[in-house]
Amino acid sequence: MKTYGELLRTPGVARLLFAQLLARFPGGMLSLGLLIHIEGIFHSYGAAGLVLASLSVGQAVAGPLTSRWMGVWRMRPVLILTTCVSACALLTLAFAPLPLTGFMAIALLTGLSFPPIQPAVRTIYPKVVNSRQLTPLFSLDASAQEIIWVAGPVLVTFTATQISSTAGILLSFVFLVGGGAWFISSPELGRVRIPRSKRRFGAVLTRPSVLVVTVVGVLIVGSFAAIEAGVIATFGNGSPQAGIVLAFFALSSLGGGLGFGHRAGRPWSLALRMCGILIGALLAAFAWEFWTLSGALLIAGLMVAPSLAVMFAAVSSSVRFSDTAEAYGWVGTGQLLGAALGSAVAGFLIDAAGAHGAFYTSVTLAALAVLIALVFRRALPDLRGRDAGPIPDTEPIPTQPS
């Protein structure tokens, strides 16, 4: 804990950490809010899954592109534009009487314009701390973001069930605009300039560590999305228990991140940490009520933040600084594709076989993630005693002949 206290006293770190958390709060609220809103309109989890998939696909397509734009037009202009467009799309989702295809189209636009806060802040981090502090900062970031998954599900579930599903979406709008404005006003966004990458778009995926982390992200986040849908289906839209169970899941991740996430990653670390997630997901498939499901997700959550921390550090240490934002954009794309996959498959299996169909989906995806991390473990760096910062960009220096 002393390490984390030292980090938070570093100038700019606490402000960046909390501002980006508020700006990203819709990430922990919007899926549940839309799930409740669309299911209430069409009375189908399959329809809700399609809308959530559209949102995630939009974010996935835009992630690497808008992240790369920040190296061309700087961070602030890109973040201002995307925040404004995404906010308008959210208001449309909340108030417009649309057919299912209309909701899917607006959800797609919302995702396409979702602000690239995560790539921006993780590109800034190596410039505000020294190399010794970077791995603990990634861990603190991964742990602190679980606050989103603690408070977000509870807030949106309570608001959507006790007030209205429209109010739940409006709550996401408030965090998107308010948190985004705070983050965009941070001085570090003006001080840190991402160099324009000289490599072609997508070339960063030729880095084995980036590719492995991206693929694993598809599967493991798909597993989380299936768990989320399964919890909602288990308790229904009229009970706040779903939000409480998901809060237990996130609190467990927060504790695990603070306890284990700061340790330097090894090639085996990712697979070992994700085994805990797999075990918890398997137990959730056999849970039958509030407490057994809560216990299973407490086990699964313990290794979520530590797994994410080792993924972030593996990417950071493998690419040049000019490619860092795009690399995190691709990782985010993988995770969002996973959310689309998990939500859509789980939604249809819930309609066909009940809530346990979602948990079986979660187990399958988590098992595939562990398998890939094991088979391709040599692609991941051994960061014991190594700097987790990005590779410096170098330029040839012209010299005069003697």
Image (spheres, rainbow, N blue to C red):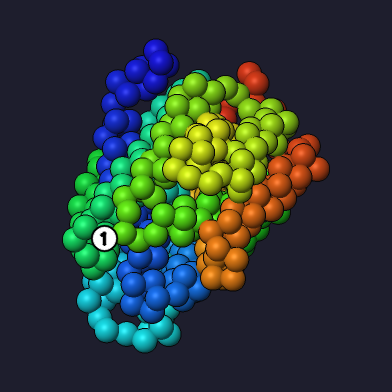
Residue nearest the viewer, comparing 110 with 379: 110
Confirm whether residue 326 shows in the render.
Answer: no
Which picture quadrant has residue 300?
top right
Q: Quadrant of the N terminus?
A: top left
User: Which residue lies most toward the top here?
Assistant: 2
Q: Using residue 244 as the reference point, say whether residue 201 is left or right of it.
A: right
Q: Amino acid at mark 1?
A: Ala
The residue shown at (71%, 47%) is 367
The residue shown at (42%, 78%) is 104
Q: How many marks?
A: 1
Which picture quadrant has residue 121?
top left
The residue shown at (32%, 24%) is 8
Confirm whether residue 118 shows in the render.
Answer: yes
Q: Using residue 30 as the reference point, say whether residue 261 is left or right of it.
A: right
Q: Secondary structure at mark 1?
A: helix
**x and y percent of residue 237 in the render?**
35, 61
Which picture quadrant has residue 318?
top right
> Residue under circle 1?
160
The residue shown at (53%, 59%) is 355
Whether residue 308 is situated above or below residue 57 in the rendered picture: above
Whether residue 258 is situated above or below residue 312 in the rendered picture: above
**x and y percent of residue 366 in the render?**
65, 47
Q: Using residue 1 as the reference point, say whether residue 295 is left or right of it.
A: right
**x and y percent of residue 102 in the render?**
38, 84
Residue nearest the viewer, comparing 284 with 84: 284
Whether residue 319 is situated above or below residue 50 in the rendered picture: above
Q: Quadrant of the C terminus?
A: top right
**x and y percent of residue 362 in the render?**
61, 52
User: Which residue lies most toward the front here?
Assistant: 288
Residue nearest the viewer, comparing 100 with 57: 100
